[in-house]
Image: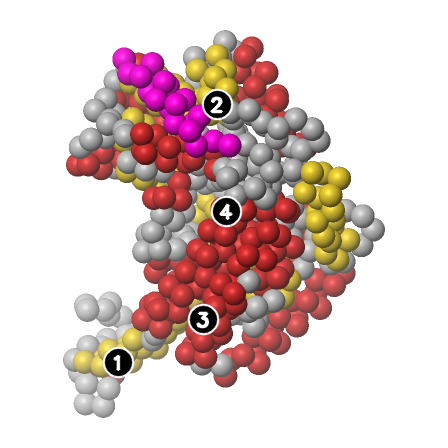
Amino acid sequence: MIGAQLVRENPARPAERVGAVPVTPVDQVDATVRAAHRDFLDRAAVTMARRLVELADAADRLDLRRAELAALLARETGKPVTDCHGEIAFAATYLRWVCANAQRVLTPTLLDDELGRLSCAQAPYGVIVAITPWNAPIILAVLKLGPALAAGNTVVLKPSPLAPLTVTEVAAMLPGVRVVHGGAELVTALVSHPLVGKVTFTGGGQAGRSIAATAGGALTPVVLELGGNDPAVFLDDFALTADDYERLVLASFATAGQVCMAAKRLYVPAGRLDEFVESYRAAAQRILLVGDPMIDEVTMGPVVTRAAATRMSELLADARHRGGSVLRLADAPTGDGYFVEPALVLGLPDDANLVCQEQFGPLVPVLGYSTEDDALARANDSELGLGASVWSADEDRAFAFAARIEAGFTFVNTHNRTGMSLRAPFGGTKRSGSGREYAEEGLREYAQPTVIHAPAAFRAGGPGLSARAYPTN
């Protein structure tokens, strides 16, 4: 932060200034939220059909500007530009999914029968505060903005200081969104504001706890997606092709491992460990190219900051100290960029930092196990419960095992974004958060049920009901 600006550097070339945004003074939060509330009242007359047209128009503009936005996103985050193209295209796809489904999910229902008249509507909360991370800033913002705006809310969006540029451009495409920039003090002021109807946050556990505590003080509901230490469990009959192994490699190392639902702990039957590691390493050598994210062929860029690179060095040093064997998977460029060599680490105990902490980087432990119960107990031995995966030649067996894993979303025979679906709600259990994104559940997070009920007993000519009676239907 320099003066009144947030300056974003290029993680691949830190001396390169990508752009800057103005810092929002904390004393402007009240005026911003009140303006968003006025926007909400003004937009009350805008029909859902019109709101969905606005979202569809934004999706079209995302498509038209995809190349420009992908280049900016790659430069400010260090993600490979081909991945950035994919993220922006997926954001447009999701907005169109909202347009196709919001009317059905959020339309009021009316029952008028022998039991009486019951109206159930979905009312907006008013002003939504959306706080988004840097690692997938466009899709993670759109997952909040699309449903919130479809339901009739307005939004104050606070992007990560590590990726403020592209998401600000995208937010400008959507009526009803105001963008602010800043750090923790700004977040506290936003979350505690009395005119905020709901808060939605994706990010780390420490920040999530602070946001939840502040929101709780104001009795403001929250949606929290707080990351995970996601296990991938390979049952003893797993049968992976060369393509499967390549998909598995990127399940851990896409975005340099800085993904909440990445495969972060790999549990493999001890008797098949050598075979697994050999095949995994061969796949990594085929598919991992670490380098400048602006080069189309690159599949892994730098980590996002110098501090992130330093943490990887510390985790690696601790792993070696705990007896881990480091298997380097690809070379990383030398120089000033925040590049980290991707690696598997073998032979670690379960209490090593790289196993029991979410590493959020390109270092992945491979852990042998003896029995299925052993694998299950160790996979579940975490306070986090976001994602997981089970790999087996028998899909029924995989589903049965997956049902015992403590995770909000368990993939079968895949992991990470290749296993996502617009119809599947995504979110965590345990300390990985609350609430859901995607699917109908993700739409309903931004609307609150309101009910009008006239029991038949009290209609003209009805039988009535004793004042001391309980309902029977």
Task: Name the residue beneath numbered marker 1.
Answer: 117
Magenta region's main secondary structure?
helix
CB contact under 8 Å: marks 1 and 4: no
**At which x and y percent is residue 465?**
22, 77
**At which x and y percent is residue 379?**
36, 27
**3D distance between C-alphas at marks 1 and 3:** 35 Å
User: Which picture quadrant has residue 207?
Assistant: top right
Task: Name the residue beneath numbered marker 2.
Answer: 329
| 3 or 2: tag closer to the N-terminus | 3
Task: Name the residue beneath numbered marker 4.
Answer: 82
Give the magenta range.
271-289
User: Which picture quadrant has residue 400?
Assistant: top left
**3D distance between C-alphas at marks 4 and 2:** 21 Å
Residue drawn at the location 73% of the way across and 43% of the way down: 16
User: Which amino acid, mark 1?
Assistant: Arg
User: Which amino acid, mark 4?
Assistant: Thr
Task: Name the residue beneath numbered marker 3.
Answer: 56
Crowd band around label 3 with a 10 angstrom C-alpha radius: few (<14), some (14–19), many (20+): many
Q: Is 10 positioned to the left or the right of 420 in the image? A: right
**3D distance between C-alphas at marks 3 and 4:** 24 Å
Instruction: Indicate whether residue 287 is drawn in magenta.
Output: yes
Q: Secondary structure at mark 2?
A: loop
| 1 or 2: tag closer to the N-terminus | 1
Q: Nearer the viewer, residue 391 or 383?
A: 391
User: Which amino acid, mark 2?
Assistant: Leu
User: Which amino acid, mark 3?
Assistant: Ala
- Asked if residue 135 shows in the view, the reply is no
**3D distance between C-alphas at marks 3 and 2:** 42 Å
| 1 or 4: tag closer to the N-terminus | 4
